[in-house]
Image: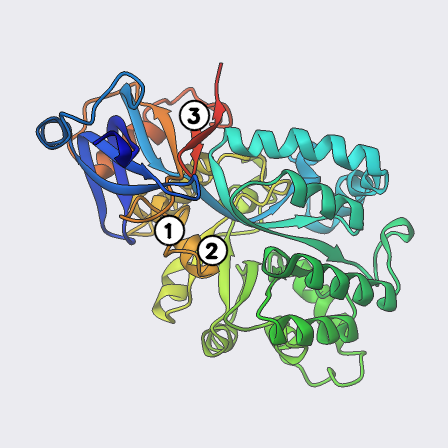
């Protein structure tokens, strides 16, 4: 039996399936098996008393890990974050465009130093592991070496792209269209599906660059990401710019601009997407574009957000548009997806929006992202045969009887708690512990 190479993790376990269903084991055992490739995959989850009967001969001192009073959930997918903005996430945010000019662009310029970028990458991606994130889509700076540093340090199913900035940008962060296109094509060829094409947004990337790079990305089935309709002032600026550009004078909205340059599609991620018309939602549905909601970033100023508004997930779901959650570091102040989940539920409840449950929040922070990226067959939740990617979290209040109550106790019971960045106790990637809080 020892040749089966089984490992057992005992705790309360949650396994999200969709917006309404989340499997729940009050005293469960996650059973994993090591494959010939060295990766641990999930065999099953069973109640502890059943595990004792079924696996009594397999339990041993070296392969049974007990976490009393702890919770095991899948590792997170953060579908929209800027690793190069970690230092500005708590800076004053009067407005999006002012915040970018005053804090974000100077911070990103510092990544022009190769040694600085390498040092920061080591620190940031260790920090990311400490919050339990092992999947998603990440924005880097314009610099090739910063993208290289991120690719070297990141673990899991995380796509990374260097932002393209060819207009309306600071001189020290502006590329020529030729430079931007050449670098994007070079990096797409080198990193293939680990790379995500990343025009910063329609304000800072010229339409020819977006069109040319999108064509190559679409041909090679590479994901694309950008920002869409985060604030009304951003939308006004975009529309004023493009009404002066040849071929765009008749565009009716922001979304149509991205459509004309080939940025929309089944492998496209549009961050924020708050202020959208019905026609824009129809276009997003038609092109099968996915949206990423960043509640902590869009939150009111008093909650350290940009005050951009509330994402209407109900309208998005009525149109059958796929969406997931993101932290938007550094517009968002907190790196932990636990904070993002908490903010999503809290903001919607305050606005009296129904169905913003904790189960929905967990699904949208895990499996929904994996489904959008097309990796849900191997990660995203704790399903049989998937990689053993999971995190361990303390449960201080153990008075719960189902998944929703368990998550409520975890995320809302601690009234005095400000953030969750330091809350995850351990992160496991393919069954190996890649982070442990000391």
Give the alpha-carbon distance from disc 2 to disc 3, as whole Å.
31 Å
Percent across and percent down for residue 286 are 46, 79
- At label 1, counting other C-alpha atoms closer than 10 Å, the crowd grade (few under 14, some 14-19, many 20 or more) is many
Which residue matches tag 1? 367
Percent across and percent down for residue 73 are 33, 36
Give the alpha-carbon distance from disc 1 to disc 3, as whole Å.
19 Å
Q: Nearer the viewer, residue 315 or 422?
A: 422
**Relative to residue 407, is residue 393 depicted above or below?**
above
Which residue matches tag 2? 311
Q: Quadrant of residue 428?
A: top left
First in residue order: circle 2 vs circle 3: 2
Q: Nearer the viewer, residue 4 or 339?
A: 4
Percent across and percent down for residue 78 are 51, 46
Q: Pointer 2 and pointer 3: residues touching (CB < 8 Å)?
A: no
Q: Quadrant of residue 93?
A: top right
Foreground mark, 2 or 1? 1
Q: Which residue is at 54% across, 73% downward?
A: 265
Asked if one can make out residue 201 in the rendered structure from this viewpoint, the answer is no
Q: Is residue 241 left or right of residue 397?
A: right
Instruction: Farthest residue to the right: give it.
Output: 171
Quadrant occupied by the N terminus: top left
Q: Quadrant of residue 431?
A: top left
Q: Which residue is at 61% across, 72% downward?
A: 220
Element marked by disc 1: helix
Q: Is residue 295 left or right of residue 393?
A: right
């Amino acid at each position: 039996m020892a040749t089966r190479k089984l490992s057992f993790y005992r705790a309360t376990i949650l396994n999200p399936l969709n917006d309404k269903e989340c499997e729940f084991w009050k005293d469960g055992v996650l059973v994993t098996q090591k494959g010939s490739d060295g990766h641990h995959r999930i065999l099953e989850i069973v109640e502890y008393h059943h595990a004792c009967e079924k696996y009594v001969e397999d339990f041993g001192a070296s392969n049974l890990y007990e976490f009393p009073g702890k919770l095991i959930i899948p590792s997170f997918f953060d579908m929209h974050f800027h690793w190069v903005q970690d230092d500005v996430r708590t800076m004053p945010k009067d407005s999006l465009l002012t915040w970018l000019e005053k804090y974000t662009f100077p911070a990103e310029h510092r990544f022009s130093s190769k040694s600085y970028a390498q040092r920061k990458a080591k620190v940031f991606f260790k920090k990311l592991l400490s919050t339990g994130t092992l999947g998603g889509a990440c924005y880097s700076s314009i610099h090739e070496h910063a993208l290289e540093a991120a690719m070297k340090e990141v673990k899991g199913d995380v796509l990374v792209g260097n932002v393209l900035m060819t207009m309306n940008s600071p001189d020290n962060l502006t590329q020529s269209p030729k430079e931007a296109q050449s670098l994007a094509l070079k990096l797409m060829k080198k990193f293939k599906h680990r790379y995500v094409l990343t025009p910063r947004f329609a304000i800072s990337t010229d339409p020819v660059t977006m069109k040319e790079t999108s064509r190559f990305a679409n041909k090679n089935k590479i994901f694309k990401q950008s920002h869409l309709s985060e604030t009304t002032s951003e939308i006004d600026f975009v529309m004023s710019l493009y009404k002066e550009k040849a071929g765009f004078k008749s565009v009716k909205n922001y979304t149509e601009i991205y459509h004309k340059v080939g940025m929309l599609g089944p492998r496209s991620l549009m961050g924020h997407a708050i202020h959208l018309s019905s026609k824009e939602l129809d276009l997003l549905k038609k092109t099968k574009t996915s949206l990423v909601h960043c509640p902590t970033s869009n939150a009111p100023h008093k909650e350290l957000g940009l005050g951009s508004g509330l994402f209407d997930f109900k309208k998005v779901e009525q149109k059958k548009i796929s969406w997931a959650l993101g932290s938007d570091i550094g517009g968002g102040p907190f790196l932990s997806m636990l904070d993002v989940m908490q903010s999503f539920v809290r903001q919607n409840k305050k606005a009296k929006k129904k169905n913003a449950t904790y189960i929905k929040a967990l699904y949208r922070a895990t499996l929904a992202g994996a489904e959008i990226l097309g990796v849900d067959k191997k990660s995203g939740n704790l399903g049989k045969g998937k990689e053993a990617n999971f995190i361990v979290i303390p449960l201080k209040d153990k008075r719960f009887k189902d998944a929703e109550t368990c998550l409520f106790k975890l995320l809302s019971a601690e009234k005095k708690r400000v953030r969750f960045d330091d809350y995850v106790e351990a992160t496991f990637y393919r069954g190996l512990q890649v982070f442990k809080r000391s």
